[in-house]
Image: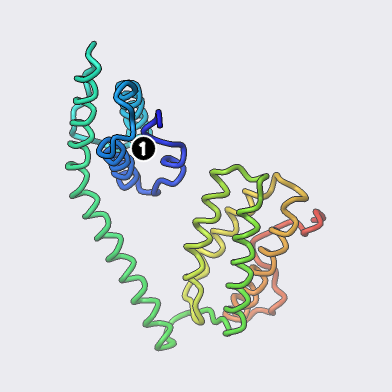
Amino acid sequence: MTHVFQDEAFESLQSDPYLAAHSLAAVFRSVHQHGKIAAKNKNTAYVEAYEMFSQFCGDSSVVLKAPPVEFVADRNLNVQRIVSFFDKVLAELEPEILARKVKTETAQARKAAHKRYLAITGKGFVYELSDSDLTEIQKLMAHLRNLFQDAEEIDDAHRALLVERLEALQPEFQRKMTSFEKVWGYFMEASYAIAKIGEPARDIRKTIREIVTIISIAASCAYGLPSSTQPPLHLPEPGGAE
């Protein structure tokens, strides 16, 4: 190993920049503690890691109190200063990370409680899916996941993101739902990812259309519209025709 941060370290970062910065600092600590970088390569590898981390924080507006590293003409001292810098960063970020996790957890619990209350009591606006709808959606989403994983025409970063978000979306589907916002948002984003790959996306388009059709029928019924009402998401026909 000659690099502290492998490519995947940046490709799988959390969307919250402070959580992402904490993850990167934790990667550095793990690599250092496990001695994964040979002594002769440490100065180069650690300086690279420091510069990449600093660039990420600058690009992501992550403000740190830890002072920047001053490099000198001494490899060992540079290494010590970089290790000390990341130790300070981790200590600084820990309270922030905990606060953000609790805030997110609390917000999610409140939202889930609201949705569950509405679903149980039937009060408020809800979309309803049948058991067969749910079974078919989960089957189609599992198939879609495999299609994305096999789609070499989609670049690695977008493919990994699509699969990750698809997996996060699956538990969202329930018999009664107060919103299809995440569903529409995901498939809208996916439509951009496959727009430029043409014929190889035929099966992906077909599978997305089948899922969207089920959702669209439920949405139409909830609004008292004909089940044939066209969904807001437009995808070309699987064969390429509009």
Specify whether 195 is left or right of 84: right
Location of the C terminus by quadrant is bottom right
**Residue 43, percent across and down?**
30, 21
Assign a secondary structure to mark 1: loop
Q: What residue type is labelled 1?
A: Ser
Closer to the camera, 75 or 214?
75
Residue ranking furthest to the top: 73
Nearer to us in this view, 55 or 145: 145
Query: In the image, is residue 143 above or below residue 53?
Result: below
Q: Which colour scheme is used?
A: rainbow
Task: Left or right? Give the position of 210 relative to 123.
Answer: right
**Label 1 sits on residue:** 60
Q: How many labels does the image show?
A: 1
Q: Residues within 10 Å of mark 1 (few under 14, many from 20)?
A: some
**Residue 235 x/y as whole percent:** 70, 57
Tell me the residue at 66%/50% (across/down).
151
Residue 163 vertical placement versus 34 (above, below)? below
Q: Which of 152 and 242 is in front in this view?
A: 152
Residue 18, image quadrant: top left
Horizontal and vertical percent for residue 62?
29, 38
List the single residue furthest toward the bottom: 121
Q: Quadrant of the N terminus?
A: top left
Q: Quadrant of residue 92?
A: top left
99 over 61 or under it: above or below = below
Question: Where's residue 77, x and y in %?
Answer: 19, 19
Residue visible at 41% across and 41% down?
9
Q: In this view, does 66 lie above or below 101?
A: above
